[in-house]
Image (cartoon, helix red, strand yellow):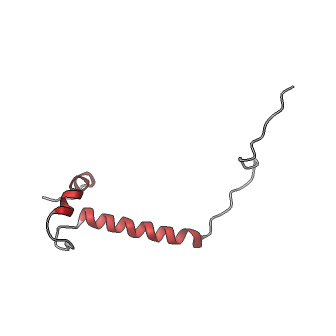
Amino acid sequence: MAQSVVSPALPAAGSAPAPLPVRAILPWALFLGTLALVLLYFVGAEQGATSVFSGSAVHEWVHDGRHLLGFPCH
């Protein structure tokens, strides 16, 4: 007769996952939100009226991303 093997790595049937506290998620959410806004700025607005860097280096680095996301650039 074959024995059934139960993996100890799997949770027991019917057990609920432990909830994540907001204090654990909030720093990561703020970090990722800030990173997304900086990326959106560089893809969408850099080399325009609010340009931070002079020249066209940033524009050339994000040029294809601008077209992919629908931002006009020329």
Q: Please name the residue shown 44% across and 69% down the image.
A: 31
Q: Position of residue 36 (x, y in %)?
A: 37, 65
Image position, residue 53 (x, y; %): 19, 71
Quarter-of-image position of residue 70: bottom left
Quadrant of res 55: bottom left
Question: Residue sitting at 71 percent across and 47 percent down?
Answer: 9
Q: Is residue 67 above or below residue 24?
A: above
Residue 28 higher or lower than 63, as above or below: below
Residue farthest top in this picture: 1
33 or 53, nearer to the observer: 53
Total number of numbered discs in the rendering: 0
Answer above or below: position of 41 versus 72.
below
Pick the quarter of the image with the N terminus.
top right
Q: Residue at x 84, y 32 (%)?
A: 3
Residue placed furthest toward the right: 1
Above or below: residue 15 compared with residue 52: above
Residue 58: image quadrant is bottom left
Q: Is residue 63 left or right of residue 18?
A: left
Measuring from the top left, give residue 21's x and y in whole percent: 62, 69
Q: Is residue 23 left or right of residue 33?
A: right
Image position of 21 (left or right of 10): left
Q: Position of residue 41 (x, y in %)?
A: 28, 67
The quadrant of the rendering that contains the C terminus is: bottom left
Name the residue located 16 percent from the left edge and 59 percent from the top edge. Answer: 73
Left or right: 41 with respect to 27?
Answer: left
Choose between 65 and 72: the one closer to the eye. Answer: 65
